[in-house]
Amino acid sequence: MSLAVTHSRALDGLAAPEVTVEVHLANGLPSFTLVGLADTEVKEARERVRAALLNSGLEFPFNKRITVNLAPADLPKESGRFDLPIALGILAASGQIDAKRLTAFEFAGELSLAGDLRPVRGALAMGLALRRQGTPRLLVLPRASAEEAALVDGLEILSAAHLLDVVRSLLPADAALLQALPRAVALPAVVLPVLRDLREVKGQSSAKRALEVAAAGGHSLLMVGPPGTGKSMLAQRFTSLLPPLTETQALESAAVLSVSGAFVPQRWRQRVLRSPHHSASSVALVGGGSPPRPGEISLAHEGVLFLDELPEFARAALEALREPLESGRITISRAARQADFPARFQLLAAMNPCPCGHHASALRSCRCSSDTISRYQARISGPLLDRIDLQVEVPAVSAATLAAAPDGDSSAVVAERVAQAQQRQWARQGCLNAALSGDAIDSHCSLDAAAARFLHSAAARLQWSARSFHRVLRIARTVADLAGNPALQVAHIAEAVQYRRVLAAQ
């Protein structure tokens, strides 16, 4: 009898708990048993490992009873990431490699039938877990996954392209074929040119101003207007106004994308723009499934989530956004387990004012009745609408006006103003204005007597909730930061009030 132990990592939300892979070879009827709450993809590793060992010129113990245990037994395991540690455990238990040397490493990788290593999801999450726990082991990954995990500072990540590359590095120290695996180096981020510039959107100065305010303060934004007025164009250019991600923000964003297999190392520290179709379900938006996977709101973490044709989304899907908009996190609960994902995204949404799209248009008459318009707008519930900071009208513009409209500021110019405003906020309060709450609002959004009278009058007339009242204060604080004013004035309050009246005025 012989026993070998290797180490790997499972995925549990954004966590990557350690998994011990125990391989036991015994005499008896030949068999290959895999235990430890393994999903179907993991159980299929038996066939991949057998073929990979044989096609790599290594021996497979056909005449042995093979038992593989993935511990802890109550942690679900999925995907093909355990192929490599299982194969190495079999080789160590059968004496083909040095079992003692396995203790210094953690392994993850899917094997092809020829022994090639294929990338796995969640490499960045595995690297973060290693650094967080302070584990002294080295992480061995397929080449593409190793380049991803190498983005985590303070870790030594080793890469391999084939099973034999790992085997050669684990032979006894006096073996002639001993070689070290190469250390992975993160690919440099690609600085993409700004292909979609805000200057390309003609006219719509008020909508551009709202976009700048939203970018400066981290506020959510709803654009309302007839079809073809530039709502989608504005949203697609929004990320060009935002500053680059910090290293902490970039790691959090990349870890979520890595878990879903959507991270591209070359786009490191670049904000994502997620734009799901309006047929997306609530599970697609907030996450779910078995095992739980992140949804669009988590994939847009530290980036932008753009929901076009907002009233066409299923009501249940939209209502599921309410809590994450406030908390910045989403907890997916199932009978057997829970998964917690970050969801600090910036919401941009666009909608027509009515089913035909031309209500209040100066160019075309609307065919919808007042009841039809009310029902259409009522698809967006009051509680959700109350959580959207800015609501701006994007009106239809005639061709003559459009042709005569001067070029506005470029994305680079607006981004510079946004960066300056955000620097003021971080220096003053340690967060963006959209994240202000409680006593921080009172401390940083104080009003003089004239501004307070104006705001209280507007709140009473428009029947705002306490949430709306505080959101207007945050927006006014952002408007003042863009202007470089330390104190809130009536003009700042007046502009903020205008961003809460669009749908009510339709």
Image: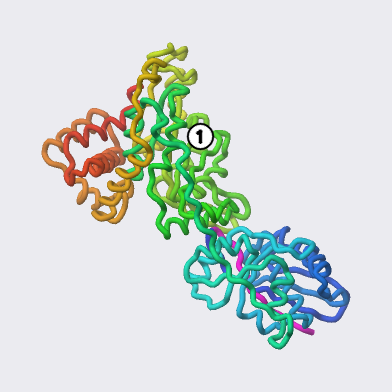
Q: Quadrant of the C terminus?
A: top left
Q: Main secondary structure of the magenta part?
A: strand
| Quadrant hosting residue 159 | bottom right
Q: In the visual, does 488 lie left or right of 69?
A: left
Q: Residue at x 42, y 60 (%)?
A: 248
| Magenta stretch holds residue 234 | no
Q: Residue at x 39, y 26 (%)?
A: 202
Q: In the visual, does 329 lie left or right of 214?
A: right
Q: Residue at x 48, y 32 (%)?
A: 310
Q: What residue is shown with label 1?
A: 315
User: What colouring does the structure picture have?
Assistant: rainbow
Q: Residue at x 46, y 18 (%)?
A: 372
Locate residue 289, reporting x and y percent: 61, 50
| Magenta stretch holds residue 3 | yes
Q: What stretch of residues is rendered in magenta?
A: 1-13
* Residue nearer the viewer, 382 or 47: 47
Q: Amino acid at mark 1?
A: Arg
Locate residue 239, reporting x and y percent: 43, 42
